Amino acid sequence: MSVKFVALLALALACLLEFAPPARAANPIFPKLFTADPVALSDGGRVYAYVGVDEAKPDDKDYVMNEWRVYSSCDMRHWVDHGSPIQAKTFAWAKGRAWAAHVVKQGNKYYFYSTVEHATVPGLSIGVAVSDSPTGPFVDARGTALITNDMTKQTDIHWDDIDPAVFVDDDGSAHLYWGNTFLKYARLKPNMTELDGDYKVMPVEPFTEAAYMHKRGATYYLSYSQGFPEETAYQTGPSPTGPWMPRGVIMAMNSGVKTIHTSIIDFNGKSYIFYHNAKLPGGSEFRRSVAVEELHYRADGTIVPIEQTLAGPKANPSPGCKVKKK
Ligand code: FUB
């Protein structure tokens, strides 16, 4: 090979590198829409991520949210868009505001718990919908709200009954957590659509919103947003109702948006935290974007604080995972 040929080859390679479009960062994971309030479900070798859609225009001063969307992945890197399996109008008794939701599998059914504004009971409320598939469509499972704002009296604010999170324990018992300012808890009946007894207020302070429960070994992890701007804190305990031991902050507050709304799952032997920030171009308080990071535990079971990254987690394919490269 002549020196001239090698020089030409090197020049061509340099030009290619220079002009090749940079690979898109993995985070935020859904670059085509503003998305928020993620919750994920690991099922059948795929992870399903359910998100609200922020439709606010740049100058809007409030959330504009009408539907939820679901995406899935078999490797935590490549995501398939399954569209919108449920909208606020799925609940005939609601008048809008598709705020944060949570999805769990119980038996062969998928239950979608969601915040919506009630049409006749002032304030935000919680509904439950059901489907035979993780990608929906979901239908209203009750025909009425599961929780309404007039059922709780701790504060006059009309958005204190938001952000449902349902945890199904190893014995099949189902536990509902929700609230803003006050964290509320109730057992669910085995039908997943009714409260089993009265609700309680959990003594978790300071608490803002976005409660989330997961279990690792025999330890229960209650994570939630605290402060405003929000940061994600967590506590641990020996049961779904505590008693709780505060363990500190695992994700620091965002810049450009005051909320953060995290949720934690295991997938293919690793743990992940989903959250939202405002890092999609044009992002802001009401134009958020969902991202994901790997989450690590220390030997004593405490969680290592998580940095937000643009790179996101490494590929973690399920056996037989085939991704469609664009
Ligand atoms: O998306 C509307 C609200 O913002 C959610 O219900 C809260 O968790 C916060 O993320």
Image (cartoon, rainbow, N blue to C red):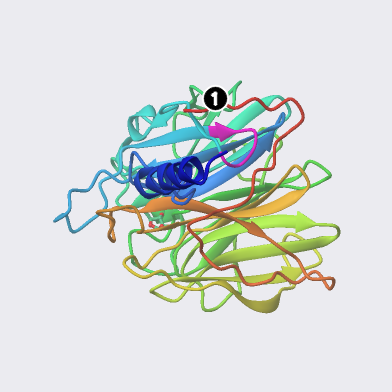
- The residue that mark 1 highlights is 324
| 197 part of magenta stretch | no
- Residue segment shown in magenta: 72-77
The reply, left or right, for residue 17 in relation to residue 156 is right
- Residue closer to the observer: 16 or 257: 16
Looking at the image, residue 136 lies above or below residue 64: above
Amino acid type at mark 1: Lys
Residue at 43% across, 43% down: 8
> In terms of image quarters, where does ligand 1 lie?
bottom left
The reply, left or right, for residue 265 in relation to residue 30 is right
Q: On the image, which quarter does residue 19 sit in?
A: top left
Residue at 72% across, 28% down: 44
Q: Secondary structure at mark 1?
A: loop
Residue 89 in percent (x, y) is at 33, 30
- Residue closer to the observer: 70 or 168: 70
Residue 77 in percent (x, y) is at 57, 41
Q: On the image, which quarter does residue 185 sit in?
A: bottom right
Q: On the image, which quarter does residue 95 sit in?
A: top left
**Helix, strand or loop for the magenta stretch, by majority:** loop
Residue at 46% across, 47% down: 7
Looking at the image, residue 256 lies above or below residue 39: below
Q: Quadrant of the N terminus?
A: top right
